[in-house]
Image (cartoon, helix red, strand yellow):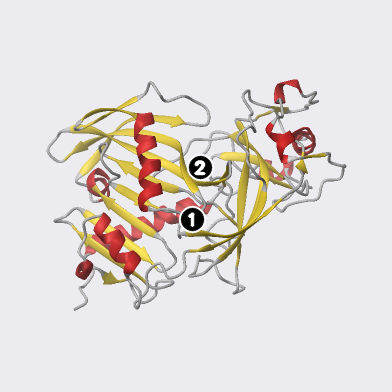
Amino acid sequence: MKKRSTGREKALRGLLALSLAVCLAGCQKTPDAVKERMSGYGENAQKNTGEASYCTVEELRETDVGSLDLALDNMKLPDGIDFSGVEDVCVLELSTSEGYVTEEDTENRDKIMGLFGIKADSLENQDSDAKGYGETYNSGADGKYLAICENGFVSYISGLEYDVIFGQAQPTGKEERHDLALEDVSGETVEFREGGAQIGEVCRQAESWMAEHMPMEELECRVSEAYAQEVKAADGEKSWQLCLRAEPWYKGIRFNDYLNNGAASQVKETAYGITLYYDGMDAPSAYINGGCGLRLESAEEADEVVDFASAVRLANEKVSSFQNQDVTKVFPMYVMQAQYEEEDQTWLSLGQKFIARPVYAFLIKAGEEDFELGITKANCYNMILVDMLTGEITVRMDVPDGGN
């Protein structure tokens, strides 16, 4: 018998939909002053006007950025740019995880329900207007919510985050934010209710948990950010929860979790990130993947790539008319582009295809993430992306100083 949705479940669905929309929404509306500076650039990739030099992937790995003679105008690069971990540079074909959960095949669904301690007969179908087949579970008695969709989207929420969503617990406003690309967290701790824990150890535990329980074939997931916040429970006791953000990597290159065209119109560039919450060391109290599951279909290796000096020159040319831009971080990145079959499609369907291209990402911090709905990065970074194979450039300078 199908159960009727409660008001609380509808509220939770709405909040989760908003959370997913935030993850997919990308940058905010471009201010007029920024639009004027962007005249002649636009948002679409552009072929560079100058010739680029190329190198092998091995030569890229050995690049000593500090020894390069780089003439810069309004752009300042950070220290510590390192390509030594790049194993291969490829063009990737991916798809959502077909057959993840359907009315006929429930093996993956049952496995996930067992992982989170939820009985199979307690799920109910999503509303009929939902895009694609899926099932949800919500129980105030258990303090658990689970959504599983046919395209591999999984959203599990329990513990402190469940209580926060339903008003049974409140953040106190105390928080700490760590960007693992910029800082060493080996000496940082978080004070869970059960006691203190090393943040770095929780991050490693999360990566091991994802590899064991939520694997993506040939892709590995690594934690990139760790945000801790203090929460006051209904009984007045205070403890900390740790929110982690992770992305897939392929042979030493991370996937894009920054650039996104937005969910309000047909998405071309598709950001992908995974959110996990920890209330203690044992296992995540919440897990939300990036709108779908991912499966690698093929990888075409490149014999050579645009060398980094050429990428810097091309990026510098594009920001020369902007005010000074201090680049926060630089790394190679795969940017996925959804290959939609329907002209007006805006959702990630069962079997959705993606092409992922490698770029040099020059990321410029222009604001702070809104932590209310988990860690999101698309609305607080300006960026210049240089295609590592063609030299084509994508420029996004639409986040105003000061952020949200």
Q: Secondary structure at mark 2?
A: loop
Residue 19 point in image, percent of width and height:
40, 53
Picture residue at 42% right of the left edge, 72% below the top: 132
Tell me residue 114's x, y (percent).
Answer: 24, 59
N-terminal-most mark, 1 or 2 = 1
Q: What residue is shown with label 2?
A: 377
Note whether 223 is above or below 14 in the view shown.
Answer: above
Going by the numbered disc 2, the residue's amino acid type is Lys
Q: Dot 2, how many residues are within 10 Å of its Cα: few (below 14), some (14-19), or many (20+)?
A: many
On the question of residue 372 being in view, the answer is: no
Which residue is at 64% across, 25% downward? 78
Percent from the top left, x then y, of residue 304? 77, 44
Label count reads 2
Query: In terms of secondary structure, where does tag 1 sit?
Result: loop
Distance CA(mark 1)–CA(mark 2): 25 Å
Q: Which residue is mark 1?
A: 217
Where does residue 27 sit, x and y in percent of width and height? Answer: 56, 47
Q: Which one is nearer the viewer's eye here, 254 or 1?
A: 254
At label 1, the amino acid type is Glu
Q: Is residue 286 visible?
A: yes
Q: In this rendering, would 358 be left or right of 130?
A: right
